[in-house]
Amino acid sequence: MCWVLYLASDVTLPAIGWDQERPAFNVEAIPPAESPVRRQFAGRYVYAVGSHTLCGCGFDRDQANPQHPEELSDAERSLGSLREYLWGAVAIAGELELYACWDGDQAAEPDHRLSLTPDDVSPTMRWFPDRTYATIAGPAT
């Protein structure tokens, strides 16, 4: 089973395709099979967001194998790319919505609700608990 991460916006956001030859952070419109997640969002455009593992598992530093230190550095790089992407997306859209869950829980009610800025998503963060819904905006000025 995989972690999945979704991002929604009222405006279109840039896609970053998956490259099997160079696994890295990726963002694509959700496929039809994942459309049940739309119920989580008010935003019209919904994206699946993946790490270097294609899915969201690579964002969870706790899943990195201590016997393979590169797994932790890959997770931190994916989290850093996610933070950078969120800053760019907030600049385009103003406010974003995020939902993180285990695959299969896309339509489940959120158990956790957060208000975040992109900087709350850092390379050293603990990954979100299952079924976390968050709004993401830039800092108040």
Image (cartoon, rainbow, N blue to C red):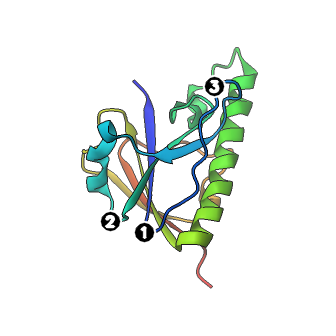
Q: CA distance from mark 1 to mark 3?
A: 30 Å
Location of residue 53 in the rendering, given as x and y in whole percent from the top left corner: 58, 28
Q: Which residue is mark 3?
A: 20
Q: Quadrant of the C terminus?
A: bottom right
Location of residue 9 in the rendering, given as x and y in whole percent from the top left corner: 45, 64
- Which mark is in front, 2 or 3? 3
Q: Amino acid at mark 3?
A: Gln
- Please give left or right for residue 41 compared with residue 49 in the image: left
Q: Amino acid at mark 2?
A: Ala
Determine which of the numbered discs, if any, sits on residue 42 in the image.
2
Q: Which residue is mark 1?
A: 10
Camera-nearest residue between 91 and 131: 91
Which residue is drawn at the image coordinates 32% and 41% (left, top)?
Answer: 32
Q: Quadrant of the N terminus?
A: top left
Mark 1 closeness class: few <14, some 14–19, many ≥20 residues within 10 Å: some
Which type of secondary structure does the marked residue at label 2 adopt? loop
Q: Earlier in the sequence, mark 1 or mark 2?
A: 1
Q: Amino acid at mark 1?
A: Asp
Labels 1 & 2 near each other (Cβ < 8 A): yes
Q: Is residue 15 above or below residue 26?
A: below
